[in-house]
């Protein structure tokens, strides 16, 4: 996710842009920039780091102008650097653009534009848009934008200016949000409402494939085909702080509900359903060794370690390769038997977890190739890896990892397909089947959010219990661990995740009428055994909360509470079954009055051993 803003009106534009970018910093903050017209000339300032760095560059300069655009970046293509920071310009330097989203077909577009003589100065996908506008500009920026976007596929929210048309900003959106602010004689475009509230509460939301032309006279909205759009103006009643959290009380809840987008964005541009192929940029340094790899070792911590446990099932079933999983913090103390035939997969949201970074270095010291699944572009783990798979979950502010986890599982599923294809054990038609199941997931995740109310009611019944058990089998056993970790880390209630089959080897002694037991019970190959385990718990007066498949009346009849998820491939069930557990932990923690976004004793990134 990135943040974009544009302003035209009576005020000095630079302070408006900087203020707006600061309010959008939660959307990304590895680099930032502004562009504005001053005495007919385009002025552009960009910097690596937070908005503060940009402010320092601008400090003391005479900054006139009353029309401009700005951007705060969360890198997806191209590391954080001044060259890759937005705004981007065309060859003439007269057109300038900011973008939030992912352009799926930027590689062929860039090749074609370079062949036509365009000179690129960044590694970003964004830059193809501004050169396409240049290619089609014949005196009308709006028309040039229209034609440029007709060639682009993927997600975008853009704002552009042209020196030859000093009174207008042209914005457009497809899949990435763009909201228009309508003030008194001043108009704005932005990625999200927080950037607008200081100037107006009257907004209109662009929809996909719409263009907005903003000038001092007002706003004109049309479809990409040029048909006029009449959109109702809405009035925002939220407080600014509530707005930054998307109307949610906590970043964690906002991020739970962002998961359908995070899953979708992590897939974008990385597959072809018709060809049954997976395209992963960032794998150039490992693609020739992958067919010869004999085993995979996964290293991670915490929630990312749970993702690694799920990945074991995915890689073994799809990639047909032996897989081991180790805590990063334990990995280095083993007498490791590693060599060039072993691929080490490091998973980390922050890309800065020192235990995982040290494990990666141990692996590289033994001639292993290392691929990392990371959410932060340019982070230490990413920089030291041979292959990189960036999840596109956007910044995760809540300490408890949610959207990054489901984005990791999405990435690991795609990587399993990629590995299977490169090892020749997965044909195109089977890949198409597995891809088709994945493509439905964002919608199924959206449907799973509806369990929020039922889970909130459960939190009222059980938030005062002192102990919870979470049980699952097979690929859902790691989700039992994740559900327990979520509850522990934000509500401070003791919770354990366990393989359900292990209950009879000890933990069943814990069961009594005070013990809520959460079962992962989707209708997969372990279902019958899970029903038997539920029976064992009920026979000892345990309280059973089950996460089951929609329509499973048999399960509902055997448990105290049943929360359902849509049916999907067993390999993808973990991405859905974790959502009710995230919501349960969240609502219990809120009911207990805990600091959900910043739980005691915890840090978002553990950079100590
Ligand atoms: C998860 O909710 C926790 N915040 C923690 O376990 C986290 O997953 C772990 O510290 C690993 O962090 P990383 O993914 O950034 O490496």
Image: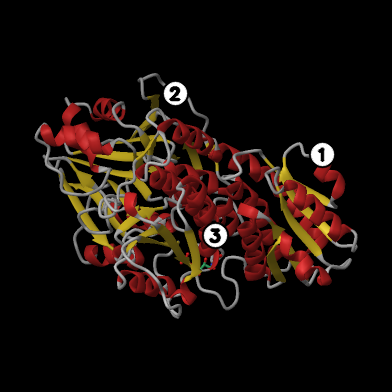
Dots 1, 3 in contact, CB < 8 A: no
Classify residue 579 as left or right of residue 146: right
Local SS, label 2: loop
Of the pair 556 and 540, the residue shown nearer to us: 540
User: Which residue is found at the position 77% from the left and 39% from the top?
Assistant: 552
In which quarter of the view is residue 85 placed?
A: bottom left
Instruction: Give the image location of residue 61, x and y in percent.
Output: 19, 62
Of the pair 559 and 19, the residue shown nearer to us: 559
Instruction: Give the image location of residue 233, x and y in percent.
Output: 51, 34
Instruction: Give the image location of residue 506, x and y in percent.
Output: 77, 72
Instruction: Report if residue 165 is visible in the image.
Output: no
**Which is more foreground, mark 3 or mark 2?**
3
Q: Name the residue beneath numbered marker 3.
A: 309
Q: Sort mark 1 into few (<14), some (14-19) or many (20+) by Cα contacts within 10 Å.
A: few
Q: Name the residue beneath numbered marker 2.
A: 229
Q: Sort mark 3 into few (<14), some (14-19) or many (20+) by Cα contacts within 10 Å.
A: many
In which quarter of the view is residue 55 placed?
A: bottom left
Q: Name the residue beneath numbered marker 1.
A: 553
Q: Earlier in the sequence, mark 3 or mark 2?
A: 2
Of the pair 220 and 609, the residue shown nearer to us: 609
Mark 1 vs mark 3, CA separation in Å: 30 Å
Dot 3 beta carbon under 8 Å from ligand 1 = no
Dots 3, 2 in contact, CB < 8 A: no
Q: Earlier in the sequence, mark 1 or mark 3?
A: 3
Q: Earlier in the sequence, mark 1 or mark 2?
A: 2
Where, quadrant-wise, is the C terminus in this rendering? bottom left
């Amino acid at each position: 996710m990135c943040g974009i803003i544009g302003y035209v009106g009576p005020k000095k534009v630079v302070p408006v842009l900087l203020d707006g970018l600061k309010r959008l910093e939660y959307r990304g903050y590895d680099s930032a920039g502004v562009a504005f017209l001053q005495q007919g000339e385009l002025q552009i300032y960009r910097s690596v780091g937070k908005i503060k760095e940009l402010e320092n560059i601008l400090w003391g300069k005479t900054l006139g102008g009353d029309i401009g655009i700005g951007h705060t970046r969360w890198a997806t293509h191209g590391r954080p650097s001044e060259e890759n920071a937005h705004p981007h310009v065309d060859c003439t330097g007269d057109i300038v653009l900011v973008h939030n989203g992912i352009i799926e077909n930027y590689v062929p577009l860039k090749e074609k534009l370079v062949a036509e003589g365009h000179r690129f100065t960044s590694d970003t996908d964004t830059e193809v848009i501004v050169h396409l506008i240049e290619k089609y500009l014949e005196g009308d920026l709006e028309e040039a934008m229209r034609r440029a976007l007709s060639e682009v596929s993927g997600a975008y929210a853009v704002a552009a200016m042209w020196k030859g048309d000093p009174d207008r900003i042209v914005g457009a959106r497809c899949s990435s949000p763009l909201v228009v602010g309508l003030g008194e004689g001043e108009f704005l475009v932005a990625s999200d409402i927080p950037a607008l509230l200081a100037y107006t509460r009257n907004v209109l939301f662009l929809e996909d494939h719409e263009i907005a032309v903003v000038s001092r006279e007002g706003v004109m909205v049309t479809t990409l085909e040029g048909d006029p759009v009449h959109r109702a103006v809405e009035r925002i009643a939220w407080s600014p702080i509530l707005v930054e959290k998307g109307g949610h009380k906590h970043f964690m809840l906002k991020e739970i509900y962002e998961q359908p987008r995070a899953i979708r964005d992590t897939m974008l541009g990385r597959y072809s359903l018709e060809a049954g192929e997976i395209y992963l940029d960032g794998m150039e340094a490992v693609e020739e060794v992958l067919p010869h790899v004999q085993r995979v070792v996964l290293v991670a911590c915490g929630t990312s370690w749970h993702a690694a446990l799920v990945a074991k099932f995915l890689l073994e079933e799809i990639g047909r390769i032996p897989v081991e999983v180790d805590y990063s913090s334990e990995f280095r103390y083993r007498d490791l038997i590693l060599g060039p035939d072993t691929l080490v997969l490091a998973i980390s949201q922050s890309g800065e977890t020192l235990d995982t970074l040290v494990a990666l270095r141990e692996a590289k010291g033994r001639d292993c190739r290392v691929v990392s699944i990371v959410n932060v572009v340019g982070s230490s783990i990413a920089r030291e890896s041979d292959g990189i798979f960036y999840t596109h979950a956007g910044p995760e502010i809540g300490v408890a990892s949610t959207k990054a986890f489901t984005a990791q599982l999405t990435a690991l599923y795609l990587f399993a397909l990629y590995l299977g294809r490169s090892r020749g054990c997965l044909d195109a038609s089977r890949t198409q089947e597995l891809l088709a199941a994945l493509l439905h997931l964002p919608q199924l995740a959206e449907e799973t959010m509806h369990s929020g109310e039922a889970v909130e009611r459960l939190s009222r019944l059980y938030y005062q219990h002192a102990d919870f058990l979470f049980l699952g089998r097979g690929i859902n056993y790691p989700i039992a661990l994740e559900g327990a970790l979520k509850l522990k880390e934000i509500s401070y209630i003791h919770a354990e995740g366990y393989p359900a089959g292990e209950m009879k080897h000890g933990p069943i002694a814990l069961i009594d009428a005070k013990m809520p037991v959460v079962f992962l019970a989707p209708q997969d190959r372990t279902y019958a055994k899970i029903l038997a385990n539920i029976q064992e718990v009920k026979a000892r007066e345990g309280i059973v909360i089950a996460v089951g498949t929609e329509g499973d009346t048999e399960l509902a009849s055997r448990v105290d509470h049943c929360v359902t998820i849509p049916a999907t491939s067993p390999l993808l069930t973990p991405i859905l079954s974790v959502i009710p557990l995230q919501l349960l932990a969240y609502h219990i923690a809120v009911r207990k009055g805990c600091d959900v976004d910043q739980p005691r004793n915890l840090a978002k990134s553990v950079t100590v051993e």
